[in-house]
Image: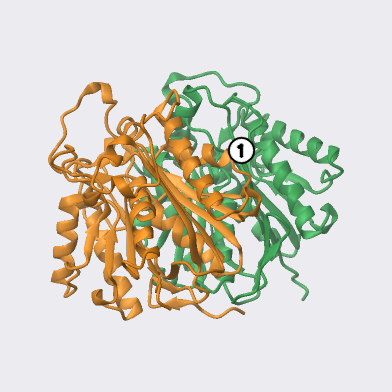
Chain colours: A green, B orange
Amino acid sequence: MSCNKRVGTQTVELKNRPKLIAATSVVGPKEAEGPLGDYFDIKLKDDKNGKDTYEKAESSILYTSITESIKKANLSEEQIDYLLCGDLQNQITSSNFAARDIKTPFIGLYGACSTFSLSLSLGAMFIDGGFANYVVTGASSHFSSAERQFRFPLEYGSQRATTCQWTVTGAGSVLLGKDGFYPEVTYITTGKVKDYGIKDVNNMGAAMAPSAVDTIYTHFKDTGRDPNYYDCIATGDLGKFGRQITETMLKSLGCDISKIYVDCGESIYDNGRQDTFSGGSGCGCSASVFTGYFYKQLIEGKISKILIISTGALMSPTTTFQGESIPGIAHAVAIEFNTRR
Amino acid sequence: MSCNKRVGTQTVELKNRPKLIAATSVVGPKEAEGPLGDYFDIKLKDDKNGKDTYEKAESSILYTSITESIKKANLSEEQIDYLLCGDLQNQITSSNFAARDIKTPFIGLYGACSTFSLSLSLGAMFIDGGFANYVVTGASSHFSSAERQFRFPLEYGSQRATTCQWTVTGAGSVLLGKDGFYPEVTYITTGKVKDYGIKDVNNMGAAMAPSAVDTIYTHFKDTGRDPNYYDCIATGDLGKFGRQITETMLKSLGCDISKIYVDCGESIYDNGRQDTFSGGSGCGCSASVFTGYFYKQLIEGKISKILIISTGALMSPTTTFQGESIPGIAHAVAIEFNTRR
């Protein structure tokens, strides 16, 4: 019987320390023009990526991100034991159709914008548990497919609220393996669904903040770590307002993360200049920012310990029409790499 | 480093043999009137289950199924390390909203009608890998929420094609653990996405059959087993026509499963009397038939080795509108229990 890896109530320790061998970010033109533009691996000039629909464009950038990560590791699709990914589309078709063209056993996930760290969590557990030698995990979103999926067709020209976020056109993937000198997954804290009754789909940050707070707080309680342990704590896509709520709520619980805390959604755009209001959102937000920016910071030794917490709002247009509030979820993954070992 | 559990190209052997401690099926009135009616645990008199929408009704039956399995095992929600489930709704809201009311770390899955065996696969790997002591896995579907999600609102009174299937109103959940004398998960074969170009959403069996064939054939190749090893091979929801295609295609590959092969979708209704044409479908189909019927057959010693292969069609209304074909996927789980040990 394998040893128990559970730590506290919601956390597991990955004793075999799965390695992040390669990572690839693909983003649209708007993301490329943002403050992190220089870091992204592949930047589209045309946000349709030559396809005839936004949905097919989204699927194509996820496909590119996955196959690029496999190439970077000098592996072939046949050597990958599992592909785990998800997206925001109904029935996660961006992922399903990307997976159709990849000769790899496929596991479809849905955690809304928490999908990136969810896929990373499961992929790392597959490696740690001895179920796989190589796994690719990933997530994607597309501004134009998400707008018509969740809000209004772009043609309506709807006015946006101050608390609105801008769905990132982007995809990110990570190739995980057992061996080598690469950043390692050390702990995973899987989130519970939290719902504080927010019904405003133009204020997703507020809907997701309680789940981020719960997962971060539980991670520290379960592991015995405190905020000083990490060089960086990065939430997925809470945006400016959700980031402020999270920071304040955690402080009131005696947990001050302000010195090392950033939100991928707040960071990906210049929200004033780029008219993105509260910031970026979507599965592709933390996926592209982690794989484009933070992964390189780890590899270059600029940071050595990061806690990434992608955050998801678990409503659908149907539940919104039916007057339901918006449940949130957040999954945390601790990634560590000491370049001076 | 834990030992490698991989067997062949798509299969893992679960050496710690996770146990299926409890299982619960919940079905609607039509399913209760079908040939397996006597086996289901909970049968609704009203397919809205007292809720004001079909979507809320679906979420409520999934919730009931999950909490009943926890009760049967004399556990509390706090003792469950992970809940893994999914459904057919946009953004899997039946699962998200069921999980909102359960105090358990939650992992959302989407594999269309393959979700039941997908959730069982991952849950069993979590137990086998030492990541969890107890896990609940499950899936649900609802005829009326699926019709308006994927086809037409019921009010349209659309005529149905001969190859059409009837989405099962039902949910099934399994409580998995490490210890005890219960049916055990021994092997898992995770499917690849297969697309043979079928575009007819009224003939899902044909769209999913190639993936069932591929997963079953690969399972035998990977494990070295042959059809004689099992007492029963059960696909998820191919229906009458999809079952015939699968049987014929496998026979042409030299693999005759006809003596022990059933399809949950073909079995759940009396398709002539109940006007269900090709048979049942939906995540809730294999979920309720496995937990309601096969699990009891295992416990009572009537069968001792079953391979369950839930099958999913990975399209969405959007991809259908955009002229895409229907990719399929199928995940196999081998479950064994010798009552005379």
Residue type, numbered disc 1: Gly
Residue B215 occupies quadrant: bottom left
Q: Is residue B138 visible?
A: yes
* Quadrant into which the C terminus of chain B falls: bottom left
Q: In this view, does B162 lie to the left or right of A65?
A: left
Residue ID at (66%, 43%):
A35
Q: In this view, does A1 lie to the left or right of B35?
A: right
Horizontal and vertical percent for residue A86? 47, 49
| Residue B313 visible in the shown view | no
Split into 4 quadrants, where in the image is the N terminus of chain B?
Answer: bottom right
Q: Compared to A315, does B82 lie above or below?
A: below
Q: Name the residue under label 1.
A: A328
Q: In this picture, is B51 found above or below A143?
A: above
- Chain letter behind tag 1: A
Is B314 on the left or on the right of B129, as rendered? left
Residue A60 rendering spot, x and y as whole percentages: 40, 49
Q: Estimate the x, y position of residue B78 in percent, counting from the top left.
A: 66, 50
Q: What element carries label 1?
A: strand
Please report the residue visible at 64 percent of the width from the left and 38 percent of the height from the top. Answer: A194
Q: Is residue B133 above or below residue B42?
A: below
